[in-house]
Amino acid sequence: MARIEVNRSGEIEVFVRVVELESFSAAARDLKMTPSAVSKLVARLEARLGTRLLRRSTRRLQLTPEGSAFFQSGVRILADIQAAEQEAAAGAAPRGRLRVNSNVPFGQNRLIPLLPEFAARYPDVAVDLVLTDRVVDLFEERADVAIRAGALAESSLIARKLGESRMVVVAAPSYLEAHGRPEAPADLAGHALLGFCFSRIHEGWPFIGENGEKISVLPAGGTLVSDGEAMRLMALAGTGIARHARWHVQPDIDAGRLVTLLENFNPGDLEGVHAVYVGQGKFLPARVRAFLDFLAEKVQIG
């Protein structure tokens, strides 16, 4: 208990447990301390930082904005300490639990087929995989690596490009037989365009007009989906017209299940696929470094 009371990592550990368990007494039981010792330690931490981290009431604890930021940093710091201790004990061999968050198309079509080989190469690394096309907060989700497609928002995260692919507009032959083939971007106004049910950095579909002007078509009013793989399946079913990275739909194009549209107006924009993560260099856990190197070796996107 003395270690927790006198060092900064111990203070962080206590504060994080109080927030996670939403109770001083629950954190005290978990850490085998007295509630008063926990309360005094958090108060001492706030005094040292010169700011209020928690608002206390008889019913609940509430984080201040400063407390929320400190909690997220604290979770990351504790995870880094744990990873460092595990690596030191194991001679820096990749081991431990690797939490990966991936967009659905990449996860289903590229990542999952590779996981057996990764597991065979690194048997001491256990992968937790979550698939979603929503951009998640790595700190809140406690993810080690996230796979993201498209433009990246500015952040403190490190990004490693896995590849990029040209964007294409596609539809199933059955849809075109029923609704006709658009010959220009303006024709899309009369068609069912598939979109996402969450906001993205770039919402509109870009085109280049006959005179070189830039055109943007917003896929509004049609069917909305939660991820790119669902959109591909909806397009294959003849529900509407979709816009995808070519790597995702190339097998369907080759097999004639989907047809490319408006190629004369295609601006040739590329969608990048990145692995984003926290930390770099010698502070990057061996399990994360091994996973990133494995992806760079095995993933081909073009």
Image (cartoon, rainbow, N blue to C red):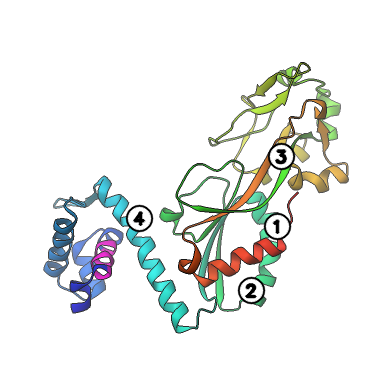
Q: Residue tagged by mark 2?
A: 119
Q: Residue 290, percent across and down?
A: 59, 69
Q: Residue tagged by mark 1?
A: 110
**What is the distance, in whole Å, between disc 3 and disc 1 at their CAs?**
15 Å
Q: Indicate whether 54 appears above or below 241.
A: below
- Mark 3 is surrounded, within 10 Å at the Cα level, by few (under 14), some (14 to 19) or many (20 or more) other residues, namely some
In terms of sequence position, does the residue under pointer 3 or pointer 2 come before the other? Answer: 2
Which residue sits at x=76%, y=29%? 266
Q: Amino acid at mark 3?
A: His
Give the residues in magenta. 9-17
Question: Do the residues under discs 2 and 4 have CB atoms within 8 angstroms?
Answer: no
Residue 72 tag number: 4
**What is the distance, in whole Å, between disc 3 and disc 4 at their CAs?**
34 Å
In terms of sequence position, does the residue under pointer 1 or pointer 2 come before the other? Answer: 1
Q: Amino acid at mark 1?
A: Arg
Q: Residue tagged by mark 3?
A: 244
Residue 124 visible in this rendered orientation of the protein? yes
In terms of sequence position, does the residue under pointer 3 or pointer 1 come before the other? Answer: 1
In terms of sequence position, does the residue under pointer 3 or pointer 4 come before the other? Answer: 4
